[in-house]
Amino acid sequence: MKAAAIAREVASRLAETDSIGLNATLDWSADLLDREAARVDAMLAPMPLHAMPIAVKDNIVTVEQPSTCASKILEGYVSPYNATAIERLRAAGAMVACKANMDEFAMGSSTENSAFGRVKNPIDHSRVPGGSSGGSAALVAAGVVPTALGSETGGSVRQPASFCGIVGIKPSYGRVSRYGLIAFGSSLDCISVFGNNVANAAAVLGVMSGHDHLDATTAREPALPLSPGDLPDLKNLVVGLPREYYPADLDPGVRAGLDRAIAAVRAQGAEVREVSLPHSKYAVPTYYIVAPAEAASNLARFDGVRYGVRRLKDGDDVADMYRRTRGEGFGPEVRRRILVGTYVLSAGYYDAYYGRAQAVRALIAEDFRKVFSGGVDLLLTPTTPTPAFKAGEKADDPVAMYYADVFVCAISLAGLPAMSIPVGRSDGLPIGAQIIAPMFQEQRMLAAAQVLERVVSATGEVR
Ligand code: GLN
């Protein structure tokens, strides 16, 4: 199919989602889509992502649209360069479909923290799509685009993928260049991908992956292949079930979804083994020290001088200008993170909080290393403790919101690749299973996910 026809179709679907008030998009235009299509149609060689429309989270910079991180402080900001991931995707024939709404600066688990309004879950509008990449997830779940880019610092693609019933992949830290991803927690941040199926998401990930001289933290590993390769079944694989990720009070619908996935893993010939990751219970408090500490430092650049919309009144001195710019430009959750991060890094508290969190982070990572070196190939867990919650339900309780990340954060702290795949629904709401792999073993994870995708119907009711 000609890219031009695909682009027109996507534009009409984008207009429709905007008109039903999903609020998943930020900037997009039919004109720009037409231009993207013309560029792709002019490509002579067959391209691996020929005319693939991709929605892009608004913290990944693109020259054609503003990149605001859904924050007032970056309103109207247009980057002078494209992120490396965007350059690679466009060169492979993909089209940037739109910029997607998100929690401000990727801080949140519900996409209620956007300065431009909350995103609705397309499956049930009274519920959240998860976050922070909620706009990207909603656009894939609504069938507007087959793939979308999100970012992960601590679960922001896997958790919304689970809430929206789609595939979400977080690669190993360093697998994809962070050049052009607006920094949140630099030791954790990963550009990540959503797909309407494993194959599409894997192709996008493959194109983006590989070393980039513009990001010294990218791994010198070869790029991932565009297709995970066909595994006929899961024979010869050992799948671990970490007992800390199956608490007695797990939501019954989530439990039923996982039971179904575990049964499928067994039926496909894998050996299933219970394992233990004892330090994972400290992952949420550890993450919520490390990530804000890094954020406090990264967000210092938004001061109205280097970056950010300057706010200043007659008679203001420079301190007033900083105060006004940052006080009015950042929303409440971002301000909370900056305050927490500054506190845990301050003299007198550094050792007690940040230093300690770093030590616990090492223990969390060591748990995974031990399990994987003990003969386990992959781990299988729920992605989230509950299905998508109602909008407003956790909005006034930051700690309850942070615990939505309880099964995803440890993996981010350890830098490992992991993904969420849909494994059915409970009372109509999607349930996601998380597959976790050893460092740089994305291929094994993706191949197993494809087998599960084939055998676990994504739409069946699990209870
Ligand atoms: N929910 C987590 C947070 O608010 C994760 C965010 C992310 O992965 N970007 O920090």
Image (spheres, grey):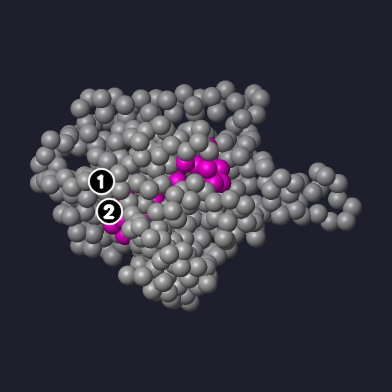
Residue 156 in percent (x, y) is at 44, 49
Q: What residue is disc 2 on?
A: 199
Mark 1 crowd level (few <14, some 14–19, many ≥20, 10 Å Cα): many
In this rendering, position of residue 104 left or right of residue 420: right
- Identify the image quadrant of the N terminus: bottom left
Task: Return the residue found at the far right.
Answer: 315
Residue 445 in percent (x, y) is at 26, 42
Of residue 393 and residue 370, the one placed in the foreground of this image is 370
Residue 67 in percent (x, y) is at 58, 56
In this rendering, position of residue 445 left or right of residue 139: left
Residue 164 in sight from this viewpoint: no
Mark number, residue 228: 1
Classify mark 1 as within 8 Å of ligand 1 or not, answering yes or no: no
Q: Residue at x 33, y 54 (%)?
A: 48
C-beta proximity under 8 Å, tags 1 and 2: yes
Q: Amino acid at mark 1?
A: Pro
- Identify the image quadrant of the C terminus: bottom left
Mark 2 crowd level (few <14, some 14–19, many ≥20, 10 Å Cα): some
Q: How many marks?
A: 2
Q: Which residues are magenta?
A: 177-202
Of residue 349 and residue 413, the one placed in the foreground of this image is 413
Q: Quadrant of residue 265?
A: top left
Q: Residue at x 67, y 41 (%)?
A: 300
Of residue 365 and residue 426, the one placed in the foreground of this image is 365
Q: Residue at x 47, y 41 (%)?
A: 177
Q: Amino acid at mark 2?
A: Ala
Q: Up-down: is 440 above or below 115? A: above
In this rendering, position of residue 255 left or right of residue 152: left
What is the C-alpha distance between the residues marked 1 and 2?
7 Å
Mark 1 / mark 2, whichever is N-terminal = 2
SS at badge 1: loop
SS at badge 2: helix
